[in-house]
């Protein structure tokens, strides 16, 4: 089938934001063609947030059971990956089948196509994945939305190519736990999965070429997480470069910039992401994919909106969804608040969770702000004390002293992502720190430690 069609809107790439935008535009009465080369919904539901958080939940349950000894008596733990693999396959991903998502989008009134799309000047060309080798040319009167996301980056490590190493996409599909696992990369993916597989019995080593785990977070958070990882038996090698990789007789060996090579049953590469904008045809409309800028309504140019991870405002589902709502209003010609990114929160779902919002202390100083920081030891708070094992953590607040408002905050601890919510609100709404100090904090909650960190701002 080689045909041309005129429609109102074409959405290329159906990550969380693209799917939501296509749904909203179709419900608003536009004729919408929504195209994805793989699964409708993108990385988050099939290979990212949802399956990995099911894995984290299972690993946390094991850790809690192991803590029971010192709190409530003996519990015997026999880890099994079977319920994890079953939940990921049956409940999270429908065995990596997007039929439900496709039907939902079609139910909203959109036409859904599986195929690889690219811009060709005024038109969008779709190479259909229906096995016919056909193409479809679409002319979109209102415009085109790109939400193509990212793919796992392959670092330039000699010998890596051609080995059966894992990326996040393989790790979430595994039906067994390797006896040993080397992870290249100590970012959010590397850290979350290191703890999951270690708690299920794998001997795990994280190789991180920077100086610390989670380098985008506060150094205090990285140090706290490293201590906990090492206490749990996870080996953390920082300032270490992975060298030649070999795969012989079903085992990996990884040479290192220093020390003995590592040997393991599996290798996970979690060394960042590669933008899917390359090859999507931006050059055909005069734009450079390696330096794409979007405005506060996600417009790259008239009639072209781009959203999600590739915009560089935080590779998180909530950013993709936030941008999607703003771009949808613009597509529909509606007014509304523009996109701002001062209070983008994130949570890495290790145990303890590492959650942050806004600027780190270093970023605030680099921005030339008059910075005051305040810290509190979560483990030493009343709630941390009563919680006991697993209750360690910290709170760090960053204040712009001239304005008297928080511009950033970090929480490490159990449910840190939830505790962070009030710091996110404070940064977002620029609530004066003097107002935050007069609030009553329930006793004994974890969030009450924020009051101690606020008091520490004054010292
Ligand atoms: C292991 C892992 C865990 C994560 N955990 C979290 C978490 O806990 N919380 C969180 O907020 N975020 C998390 N993320 C990040 C989150 O998955 C992404 O930020 C989110 O998916 C938003 O991405 P996106 O909207 O840019 O598009 P994506 O989800 O990447 O989707 C893009 C879609 O575009 C399609 N596509 C690309 N090019 C084309 C083309 N030319 N034609 C047609 N279709 C195309 C792709 O097939 C894909 O379906 C995690 C990511 C990973 C990898
Ligand atoms: N809970 C969450 O919200 C969550 C969880 C997972 C992923 N994510 C999103 O997905 C994105 C991608 O995650 P990621 O962890 O792959 O990427 P990342 O870019 O955040 O971290 C990759 C890490 O790998 C290191 N690295 C790169 N090349 C290396 C090499 N050759 N040797 C050793 N170390 C190397 C980098 O220093 C970096 O710290 C994240 O930035 C985040 O936005 C979010």
Image: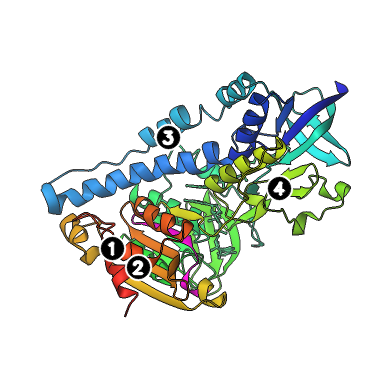
Would residue 205 be visible to someone looking at this image?
A: yes
Earlier along the polypeptide chain: callout 1 or callout 4?
4
Does the residue tagged 4 have its C-beta within 8 Å of any atom of ligand 1?
A: yes
Looking at the picture, how far across and down is residue 270, in whole percent? 55, 55
- Where are the magenta residues, as a range? 350-362
Which residue is at 35% across, 61% downward? 412
Which residue is at 41% across, 76% downward? 372
Q: Residues within 10 Å of mark 2 (few under 14, many from 20)?
A: few
Q: Is there a contact, CB below 8 Å, between mark 1 and mark 2?
A: yes
Helix, strand, or loop for circle 1?
A: loop
Q: Is residue 359 left or right of residue 376?
A: right
Residue with the mark numbered 1: 438
Q: Nearer the viewer, mark 1 or mark 4?
A: 1
Earlier along the polypeptide chain: callout 4 or callout 2?
4
Residue 85: numbered disc: 3
Would residue 167 be visible to someone looking at this image?
A: no
Q: Residues within 10 Å of mark 1 (few under 14, many from 20)?
A: few
Looking at the picture, how far across and down is residue 343, in whole percent? 50, 57
Residue with the mark numbered 2: 434
What's the distance in space between the residues labelled 3 and 2, CA to CA?
Answer: 49 Å
Q: Is residue 275 left or right of residue 268?
A: right
Q: Nearer the viewer, residue 30 or 161?
A: 30
């Amino acid at each position: 089938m080689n045909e041309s069609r005129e429609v109102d809107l074409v959405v290329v790439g159906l990550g969380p934001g693209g799917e939501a935008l296509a749904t909203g535009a179709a419900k608003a009465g536009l004729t919408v063609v929504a195209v994805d080369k793989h699964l409708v919904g993108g990385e988050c539901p099939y290979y990212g947030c949802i399956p990995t958080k099911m894995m984290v939940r299972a690993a946390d349950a094991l850790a809690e059971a192991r803590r029971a000894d010192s709190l409530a008596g003996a519990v015997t733990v026999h880890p099994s990956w079977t319920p994890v693999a079953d939940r990921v396959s049956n409940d999270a991903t429908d065995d990596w089948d997007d039929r439900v998502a496709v039907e939902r989008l079609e139910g909203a009134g959109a036409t859904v196509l599986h195929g690889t799309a690219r811009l060709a000047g005024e038109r969008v060309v779709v190479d259909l994945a229906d096995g016919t080798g056909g193409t479809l040319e679409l002319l979109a009167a209102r415009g085109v939305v790109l939400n193509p996301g990212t793919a796992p980056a392959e670092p330039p490590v000699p010998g890596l190519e051609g080995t059966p190493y894992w990326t996040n996409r393989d790790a979430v599909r595994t039906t067994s736990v390797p006896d040993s696992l080397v992870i290249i990369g100590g970012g959010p993916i590397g850290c979350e999965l290191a703890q999951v597989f270690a708690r299920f019995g794998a001997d795990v080593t994280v190789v991180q070429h920077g100086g610390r785990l989670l380098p985008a977070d506060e150094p205090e958070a990285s140090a706290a997480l490293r201590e906990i990882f090492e206490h749990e038996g996870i080996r953390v090698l920082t300032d270490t470069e992975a060298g030649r990789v070999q795969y012989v007789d079903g085992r990996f060996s990884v040479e290192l910039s220093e020390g003995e090579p590592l040997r393991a049953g599996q290798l996970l590469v979690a060394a960042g992401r590669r933008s899917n904008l390359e090859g999507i045809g931006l050059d055909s409309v005069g734009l450079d994919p390696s330096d794409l800028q979007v405005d506060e309504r996600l417009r790259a140019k008239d009639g072209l909106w781009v959203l999600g991870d590739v915009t560089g405002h935080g590779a998180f589902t909530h950013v993709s969804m936030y941008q999607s709502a703003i771009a949808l209003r613009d597509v529909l010609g509606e007014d509304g608040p523009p996109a701002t990114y001062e209070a983008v929160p994130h949570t890495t779902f290790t145990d303890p969770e590492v959650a942050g919002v806004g600027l780190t202390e270093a970023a605030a100083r680099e921005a030339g702000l008059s910075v005051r920081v305040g810290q509190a030891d979560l483990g030493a708070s009343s709630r941390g004390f009563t919680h006991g094992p697993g209750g360690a953590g910290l709170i760090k607040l960053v204040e712009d002293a001239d304005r008297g408002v928080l511009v950033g905050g970090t929480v490490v601890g159990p449910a840190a992502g939830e505790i962070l919510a009030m710091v996110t609100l404070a940064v977002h709404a620029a609530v004066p720190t003097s107002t935050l100090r007069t609030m009553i904090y329930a006793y004994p909650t974890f969030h009450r430690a924020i009051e101690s960190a606020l008091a520490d701002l004054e010292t």
